[in-house]
Image (tube, helix red, strand yellow):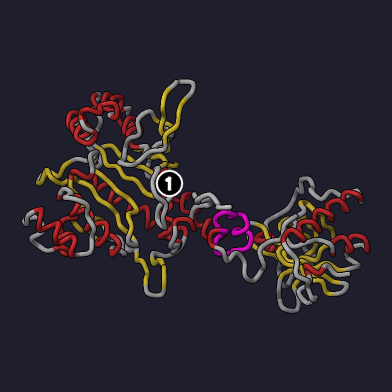
Amino acid sequence: MENQENSPAAEIPVQTVEDIFTQRVNKVQELKNEGAKPFGEAFEGAEHVSIIREKFKDDSTEEVSCCAAGRLTAFRVMGKSIFADIRDSSGRMQLYAQKGHLSEEDFAKFKKLDIGDIIGIKGVLFKTRTAEITIKVTDYRLLSKSLRPLPEKWHGLTDVEQRYRQRYLDLIVNDVTRETFKKRFAIIREIRNFLEQKGFIEVETPMLQPIPGGASANPFKTFYEALNSPMYMRIAPELYLKRLLVGGFEKVYELNRNFRNEGMSRRHNPEFTMIEIYQAYGDCRTMMALIEELVTTVAMNVLGTLEIKHSEDKIINLSRPWRIAPYNDLIKEKAGNDWFEVSSEERLKRGREMGLKFEGTPPDFEVTHEIYEKLIEQTLIQPTFVTRLPAVLVPLAKKCEDNPSLVDVFELEINGQEVSPGYSELNDPIEQRRRFEEQTGSADAGKIDEDFLTAMEHGMPPAGGMGIGIDRLVMMLTGAESIRDVILFPQLRPKSN
């Protein structure tokens, strides 16, 4: 009798997932009773189906043998023949099993396989009447019995949260998800290749830090039992990478995780992948040229284009050169040419008239930056270097020589979000100490990284530095609209019972 679960033409009774689970557990016991192994051993010699496809030649007179392994994703019983699909990480391949090529016993066992089972097969290649390259099965082995059914073939995972919680299912049934992550891995590989060719070396610095530094963010806190000391998951590797500049490594980068105990959103995940890059004897403009070349090179090598489609009416064009826009100029365009001449009261009034909400009487720079973050940043779709930011916002950068109230930095904005900040790095230890004290308050000296300042006091070369949010870069390059779509296992709230 046909396996009704696998036969779409049969009148299938309604079954729950637990019903199917029970049936398959019983199948496992039956297989064991027959001396079979439902959870098999190594299957050597299997090739990716993409490689197997390349072996087939229409004009070949020789029979081409092959060996493959993967998961059954379709199963169609047609009397004495069975058509099935097998999928591995490289793609899908059709299988054809028939009495005559398999023994009566093996064909009967093959017929009892379920969608989701992982099998190894040996066979020969041929083309069907519909011109589909297919493997005629001559031998097979059950490698792992699937106890739970896969999501329904045509509808897949319609629950977005389930896609994130059970990413393994999303990867099995969703071609778009699988391709997005393949692109992510390729993007990271190309970034490393690019930087190696430029003479940068990859390093590793501590993720557990006694003082969280390098950014302004709320850290995750833990406790180091052996040292009887509180520790923090790093919010950035910056201060350790700069120690390496002091030590004589002139071109360094680290590609790894940062952790910030803050909110989750479409563009934020508390655990995220970041690359930070430092080049001695460079500056902000060195970093602007580097990231412009890096992103365009990666886009061409991975995607083959500099035009990234996000929707029918939004295409991001990465062609160089990219726009450069001073921060104050953008503010004036939005809030008025006289913005920086009017009183604090007038700025607060205008901000509220533009729909912004403020509690009490915030300082001028906060009102101004709220306009930038809430009303300007999201409009910067095409690549834009926003430069010359207020010094109060960036305590680790050099001031602009012509205006000490500004710092020599950029924020690279693409698709309405920051992809990369870059600086002319501050290398004056006296000024750095003053800014740390100003930032933390002189009464809270314990938050100042004295070891880093000691390193700087030995002499740190002038340098350019920048960070690149890998997750956001991948979002931009793949057209993803949520950061959760480019992180394999994003952070989620615990499931409610």
The residue shown at (18%, 53%) is 367
Q: Residue 360 in the image: state x and y as whole percent.
A: 19, 50
The residue shown at (18%, 44%) is 391
Binning the other alpha carbons within 10 Å of mark 1 as few (below 14), some (14 to 19) or many (20 upward) gives some
Report if residue 249 lies within the magenta region: no
Residue extending furthest right?
Answer: 104
Element class at badge 1: loop
Residue 61 visible in the snapshot: no
- The span shown in magenta is 162-177
Which residue is nearer to you in this view: 461 or 494?
A: 494
The image quarter containing residue 383 is bottom left
Residue 109 lies left or right of residue 487; in this view the side is right
Which residue is nearer to you in this view: 65 or 50?
A: 50
Residue extending furthest bottom?
Answer: 129
The residue shown at (41%, 68%) is 310
Q: Quadrant of the N terminus?
A: bottom right
Q: Main secondary structure of the magenta part?
A: helix
Which residue is nearer to you in this view: 397 or 154?
A: 154
425 to 224, vertically: above or below = below
Q: Residue 396 in the image: state x and y as whole percent.
A: 24, 38
Report if residue 175 lies within the magenta region: yes
Three-letter residue code for mark 1: Pro
The residue shown at (78%, 61%) is 114
Q: Residue 197 in the image: state x and y as whole percent.
A: 41, 45
Q: State the residue position of label 1.
A: 270
